[in-house]
Amino acid sequence: MGYAEVSVNSPIAQRKTFSYTIPSDLSIDVGQAVWAPFGDKLLQGIVLELTDYPSVEETKEIAGIIEPRPVLSPFHVLLARWISEHYLSPLFDAVALMLPPGFERKVLTFICSPPATGEPDISCLTGEQRHVVELVWRQGKVGLRELEKALGARRARLITSKLIGQGLVVKSYELEGVKVKPKRVPYLRLAVKASEAGQEAAKLRQQRAIKQASLVEFLSQA
């Protein structure tokens, strides 16, 4: 069994890494982005070291891989550690300097229909539970946030936890999409013919409006 020292995206973490068990079905490398259980949340983390022994007695398992390939090179891992130690900055803040744009996004939780295993019995479910199951099965996946809005946060979590325990639904995680805003670039252009602009520039020079005249002349030549 192997272990990973992970820098997690949480202000609580400060300059520490946390030990996680590497599941037998996952292949993990240094610099890889992973899902790391942290308290009752699932956070983004970066693997900074692989070890044979954890730094604590009890460890949680890495929940999954965010990116199939490492997002940091060994050099960048060492550089992030040095920045954190030298400037006494939170470790993940130093790591984040090396990450590709858009990496630090919100984690979205979805409730999904499980792999087909025959027709499960839902006769013992309450009306609310049956409604959630049927909604998930019909749509394939439903955002936990959507269920929380409809049922209330506490109720939605209780229902989904029970359904997950019975194997009727499963939970999955995705990164929120990158929000790219269109960039507006202001520019100037002549509203008259170049010949008219030249005449106007001459008038401006006579009025000693040298900068304005130069601008009009420049635009007329563009």
Image: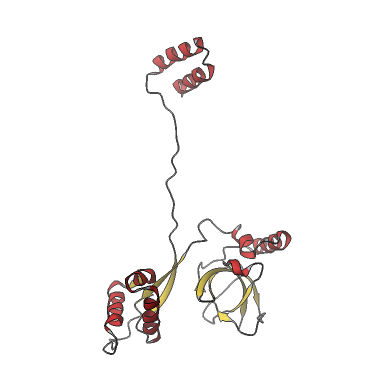
Residue 88 image-quadrant placement: bottom right
x%, y% of residue 37?
53, 75
Give the image's coloring scheme. Answer: secondary structure
Q: Residue at x 39, y 15 (%)?
A: 196
x%, y% of residue 186?
45, 35
Q: Residue at x 31, y 75 (%)?
A: 136
In the rendered view, does 141 fall on the left or right side of 8?
left
Q: Residue at x 37, y 79 (%)?
A: 160
Residue 46 image-quadrant placement: bottom right
Q: Is residue 47 visible?
A: no
x%, y% of residue 214?
51, 19
Q: Is residue 43 visible?
A: yes
x%, y% of residue 133?
30, 79
Please state which of residues 67 and 154 is positioned toward the viewer in this rendering: 154
Q: Is residue 90 above or below residue 18?
A: above
In the rendered view, does 90 fall on the left or right side of 127?
right
- Number of numbered markers: 0
Q: Is residue 74 above or below residue 166?
A: above
Please state which of residues 161 and 5 is positioned toward the viewer in this rendering: 161
Q: Residue at x 44, y 52 (%)?
A: 180
In the rendered image, the quadrant that contains the N terminus is bottom right
Work out which residue is located at the far top of the displayed protein and give it. 206
Please state which of residues 107 and 156 is positioned toward the viewer in this rendering: 156
